[in-house]
């Protein structure tokens, strides 16, 4: 879905260039009507297997991070186990986490390996926020894209930790600022058509659609992320200059640039590029990691800081070394 297509739908003064200037996004991928987050996750995992990283039979545990599961029950991870051909003695669970989900998942995967519970953990993030978005809500439709990523976490011999330490944070008081109000047990979906209303900016949505309070999310981010970075540096015993590269959740270009300036990271050490894919929620960090590797910006031995933040409110940060 390109900015030209959106500008044609929105009309008025919403040009393709205006959308790019507001978001840093020129296009975003949208799942087909019958395509789910687990479909994207299966495709991502199959690409990982095809790369030779491991075979399906090698996976001891599947972690699937999604906020758009196929069903309330069973867990999407269980159906993915069958579709991917994983062993029946492999573990498989969903966890519902958004923009901080990949870092949370990385910590869960590392814990499983270190505890001896699993040797190889497949961490899959997948999201189809487009299915929650009202077509006339410009505040979110211009930002989000659908995607999945697959990460293999396995044990290797080393004289120091290659993943970690971690820091985490949660503030549920902000839950109402990024939410789909209906559809769960708190406010079940009904057969009635929910009324659509418009806000002061001309965005339309119903309570079955994704709602984002942009200014509040922005304020939360500017407060929590710099603090998380400082906490992780202190916990790891490193100075900011010891970190070779920073990969933050790719929310939007403007927010990332503000964060980079506030944290004091040089531009050459910071990833800020969602131009072709949009904000893919829990998959932004692993996608950025892969793109940075392909562009030669992550060299062997590099110390990387990954920071996730958003819906919940939830945030997390981790150090990881490139092999």
Image (cartoon, rainbow, N blue to C red):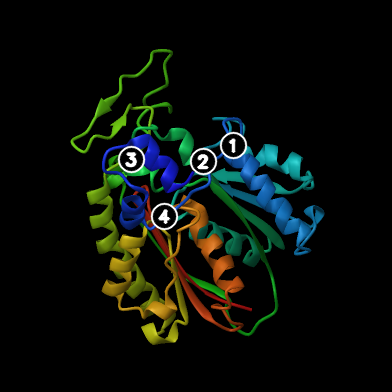
Residue bearing the label numbered 1: 36
Q: Secondary structure at mark 1?
A: loop
Contact flag, marks 2 and 4 (Cβ < 8 Å) = no
For the C terminus, the image quarter is bottom right
Mark 4 or mark 3, earlier in chain: 4
Q: How many angstroms separate mark 1 from mark 4 (CA)?
A: 23 Å
What residue is at 44 percent from the left and 41 percent from the top?
A: 5
Question: Where in the figure is residue 148, as x and y percent of width and height?
Answer: 58, 50
**Residue beneath label 4, please?**
25
The answer to whether marks 2 and 1 mark residues whose Cβ atoms lie closer than 8 Å is yes
Select label 1 or label 4 by which is in front: 4
Q: Upstream in the sequence, badge 2 or badge 1?
A: 1
Q: Based on the displayed image, in which of its 4 quarters is residue 132 positioned?
A: top left
Instruction: Report the side of 194 relative to 53 (left or right).
Output: left
Q: CA distance from mark 2 to mark 1?
A: 7 Å
Residue 77 position, x and y percent, is: 64, 42
Tell me the CA gap for discs 4 and 3: 13 Å
Position of residue 207 relative to residue 211, above or below, is above
Specify few, some or many for label 1: CA neighbours under 10 Å numbering under 14, 14-19, or 20 or more: many
Label placed on residue 128: 2
């Amino acid at each position: 879905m390109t900015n030209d297509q959106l500008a044609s739908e929105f009309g008025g003064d919403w040009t393709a260039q205006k959308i790019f200037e507001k978001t840093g996004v020129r296009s975003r991928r949208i799942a087909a009507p019958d395509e789910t987050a687990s479909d994207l996750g299966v495709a991502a995992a199959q690409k990982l297997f095809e790369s030779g990283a491991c075979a399906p039979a090698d996976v001891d545990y599947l972690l699937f991070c999604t906020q758009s599961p196929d069903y309330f029950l069973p867990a999407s991870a269980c159906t993915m186990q069958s579709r991917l051909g994983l062993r029946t003695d492999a573990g498989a669970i969903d966890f519902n986490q958004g923009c901080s989900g990949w870092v949370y998942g990385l910590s869960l995967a590392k814990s499983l390996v270190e505890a001896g519970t699993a040797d190889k953990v497949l961490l899959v993030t997948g999201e189809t926020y487009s299915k929650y978005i009202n077509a006339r809500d410009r505040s979110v439709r211009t930002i989000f894209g659908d995607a999945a990523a697959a990460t293999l976490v396995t044990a290797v011999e080393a004289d120091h930790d290659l993943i970690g330490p971690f820091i985490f944070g949660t503030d549920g008081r902000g839950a109402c600022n990024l939410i789909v109000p209906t559809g769960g047990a708190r406010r079940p979906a009904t057969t009635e058509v929910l009324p659509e209303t418009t806000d002061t900016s001309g965005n339309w949505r119903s309570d079955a659609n994704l709602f984002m309070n942009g200014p509040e999310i922005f304020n939360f981010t500017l407060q929590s992320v710099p603090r998380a970075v400082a906490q992780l540096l202190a916990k790891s015993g490193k100075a900011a200059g010891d970190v070779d590269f920073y990969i933050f959740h790719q929310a939007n270009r403007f927010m990332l640039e503000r964060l980079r300036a506030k944290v004091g990271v040089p531009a050459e050490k910071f990833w800020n590029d969602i131009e072709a894919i949009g904000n893919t929620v829990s998959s932004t960090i692993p996608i950025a990691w892969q793109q940075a590797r392909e562009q030669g910006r992550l060299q062997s031995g590099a110390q990387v800081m990954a920071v996730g933040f958003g819906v919940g409110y939830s945030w997390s940060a981790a150090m990881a070394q490139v092999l």
